[in-house]
């Protein structure tokens, strides 16, 4: 489907590297992003996401390699690239003592837009984002409103490509959902969106394709469904224990169950937790519970059944949880 929907390249990255002395923040990244798709780069904090986006937006000069934005090199055609992109950084960047309209108008004028045109475009854009007409200073906005204002500031110049670096970081669940709704609306426009995130649910629910980055390298990429099918299983049973010996008993019994694909041990909220990946859905879950693997266990603290996730993909590839 993606091949027919997205034919032209918006971004092509070729062996891009950025080293800070001994630290290889980005270490040989290569990938292609098609026009009109929402492409997420998913990875833990410190994986290299922000460094990568700073190179693609010409803020940082690569140590080696190159990337092409609409066919133009980030090394030699920076001025042309800046005209085509919008950036919403991880740290909310607004002018606290300006109103919402004034913030957006200021950015528009900085891009060379006539004031009257800037004023009208700012009003319309903020109406779309649900924050038009507010007379209080931006510093009094909620976190979700500030993030939406930042998005409006990034969009006022009508960019072909929009970079979103952790757009829902630090927001409460309600504000996060509002920002996701805004991003979904943006997908309906003819804009290529590059989303940098460590939030697996965010990447899974919003993305056309995902690249997983770890320690400066791309370790997997594809649609969320492809990645979960390739590196995961249908379902996961999470079982938390008070004692390690109880976890070990269950882990030993699971080896004899043919539809159990794999097991992994993690710490979740201080609990010793076993993740049991298995095929076959609820029918096999019932069989799993009927195997008697909970016999001789003093106490199971918690048990949860869920679908396979992108965090399971990361865990299966790296041996670590995404948030470790």
Image (spheres, rainbow, N blue to C red):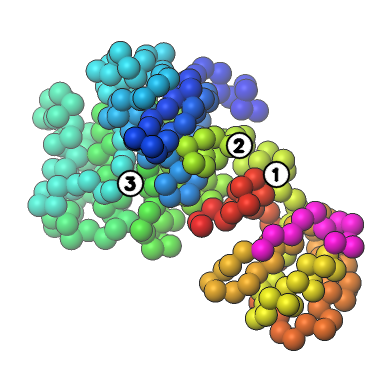
The kind of secondary structure element at disc 2 is strand
Please name the residue shown 22% across and 46% down the image: 93
Q: Residue at x 31, y 40 (%)?
A: 88
- Foreground mark, 2 or 3, reads 2
Disc 3 versus disc 1: distance between alpha carbons? 29 Å
Q: Is residue 67 above or below residue 205?
A: above
> Disc 3 designates what residue?
90
Q: Nearer the viewer, residue 276 or 284?
A: 276
CA separation, marks 2 and 3? 23 Å
Whole-number angstrom distance, CA of label 2 to CA of label 1: 9 Å
Which residue is identified by label 2? 220
Q: Which dot marks residue 231?
A: 1
Q: Earlier in the sequence, mark 2 or mark 1?
A: 2
Image spot of residue 52 (x, y percent): 40, 33
Write down the quadrant of residue 195 in the picture: top left
Q: What span is colored magenta in the figure?
A: 255-265
In this rendering, does residue 71 appear at all? yes
Are discs 3 and 1 less than 8 Å apart at CB?
no
Report crowding for label 3: few under 14, some 14 to 19, many 20 or more residues within 10 A (C-alpha).
some
Q: Nearer the viewer, residue 120 or 201?
A: 201
Residue 231 coordinates in the image, percent (x, y)? 70, 44
Question: For the residue labelled by badge 1, is the local secondary structure a helix, a strand or a loop?
Answer: helix
Magenta span has 88?
no
Q: Is residue 256 magenta?
A: yes
Residue name at image x 34 percent, y 35 percent = 20
- Where on the picture, by quarter, is residue 73? top left
Give left or right: position of 112 versus 186.
left
From the viewer's perspective, is residue 48 above or below residue 175?
above
Disc 2 vs disc 1: Cβ atoms closer than 8 Å?
A: yes
Q: Classify 10 Å Cα crowding around label 1: few (below 14), some (14-19), many (20 and above).
A: some
């Amino acid at each position: 489907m993606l091949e027919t929907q997205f034919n032209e390249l918006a971004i092509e990255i070729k062996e891009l590297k950025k080293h800070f002395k001994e630290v290889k923040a980005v270490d040989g990244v290569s990938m292609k992003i098609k026009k009109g798709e929402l492409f997420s780069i998913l990875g833990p904090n410190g994986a290299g996401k922000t460094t990568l986006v700073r190179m693609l937006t010409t803020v940082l000069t690569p140590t080696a390699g190159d990337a092409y934005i609409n066919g133009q090199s980030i090394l030699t055609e920076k001025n042309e690239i800046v005209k085509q992109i919008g950036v919403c950084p991880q740290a909310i960047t607004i002018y606290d003592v300006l109103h919402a309209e004034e913030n957006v108008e200021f950015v528009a004028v900085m891009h060379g837009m006539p004031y009257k045109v800037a004023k009208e475009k700012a009003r319309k854009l903020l109406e779309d984002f649900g924050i038009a007409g507010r007379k209080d200073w931006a510093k009094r906005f909620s976190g979700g409103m500030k993030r939406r204002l930042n998005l409006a500031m990034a969009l006022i110049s009508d960019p072909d490509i929009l970079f979103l670096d952790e757009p829902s970081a630090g927001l409460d669940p309600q504000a996060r959902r509002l920002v996701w709704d805004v991003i979904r609306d943006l997908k309906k426009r003819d804009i290529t969106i590059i989303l940098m995130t460590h939030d697996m649910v965010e990447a899974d629910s919003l993305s056309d394709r995902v690249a997983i980055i770890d320690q400066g390298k791309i370790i997997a990429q594809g649609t969320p469904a492809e990645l979960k099918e390739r590196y995961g299983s249908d379902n996961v049973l999470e079982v938390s224990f008070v004692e390690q010996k109880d976890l070990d008993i269950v882990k030993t019994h699971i080896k004899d169950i043919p539809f159990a694909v794999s097991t992994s041990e993690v710490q979740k909220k201080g609990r010793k937790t076993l993740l049991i990946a298995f095929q076959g859905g609820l029918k096999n879950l019932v069989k799993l519970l009927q195997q008697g693997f909970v016999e001789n266990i003093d106490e199971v603290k918690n048990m949860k059944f869920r679908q396979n996730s992108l965090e399971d993909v990361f865990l299966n590839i790296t041996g670590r949880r995404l948030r470790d």
